[in-house]
Amino acid sequence: MNVWKAAFFSLAGLVAAALVVLIILIGGTTASSPLPEDTAKQDEGYTLALNTTKKNFEGIANTYIRKAVKGSLPVELEMRDDVLLTSELTVFSYTLPLAMHFDPIVREDGNLILKQSSMELGDLNIPPSTVLKLLKNSVELPSWMIVRPKEEEIFIDLEDLPISGDVQVKAKEVNLAQDEIILEVLIPKN
């Protein structure tokens, strides 16, 4: 056998093995991070109800996301009839646009769960859980955003938002169809 043939088949075998290992690493499901316990205690304080619109909430959310991500990757949140999270992922030196659609769910403790309804990653057909796993592993997200690939959701811990003082924020209602978002702000007594 020719030396060049042997080298070619060896190289082809190494490339195939690397692809198999990459597919196993990306496709394997890992345990999702546990959600924080409902530790919200009703401190004595003053409660302020905030009614806001999708546009205002979008601006506030993007401000916190930009501060937390610190320009490492462009992540934008857009409020429509659903919540749209856009970014880009680099795979094999190709930058692919990423658009994930979520339905917001308000938990009893006032935190938000963004349940994934659909996603687009360039022209690729990849399961949503895999895209969330890639997002979790490639982007350093703030501690108040917990990506849970297995459940196809992102948990937003409003209690962990970096707000000055001991101010706590809770979501009361998110009605995107009616353009109504109600937040509750608790300002503790000193």
Image (cartoon, rainbow, N blue to C red):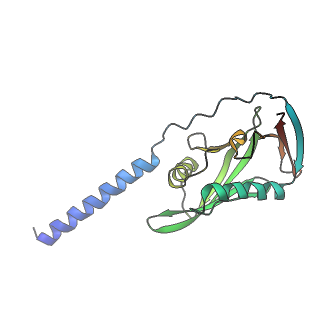
Which of the 4 quarters of the picture holds residue 48? top right
Q: Nearer the viewer, residue 89 or 171?
A: 171
Query: 114 and 116: which one is in front?
Result: 114
Q: Where is residue 17 in the image (x, y as percent from the top left)?
A: 30, 55
**Residue at the image position 45 percent from the left and 50 percent from the top:** 26
Q: Where is residue 96 in the image (x, y as percent from the top left)?
A: 55, 66
Q: Residue at x 77, y 32 (%)?
A: 108
Work out whether 127 lies above or below 47. below
Judged left or right of residue 56, residue 15 is left
Image quadrant in which the C terminus is located: top right
* Residue positioned 35% across, 51% down in the render: 21
Which quadrant would residue 84 be assigned to in this image?
bottom right
Q: In which quarter of the image is residue 122?
A: bottom right
Residue 100 position, x and y percent, is: 65, 55
Front-lying residue, 170 or 122? 170
Residue 135 x/y as whole percent: 55, 53
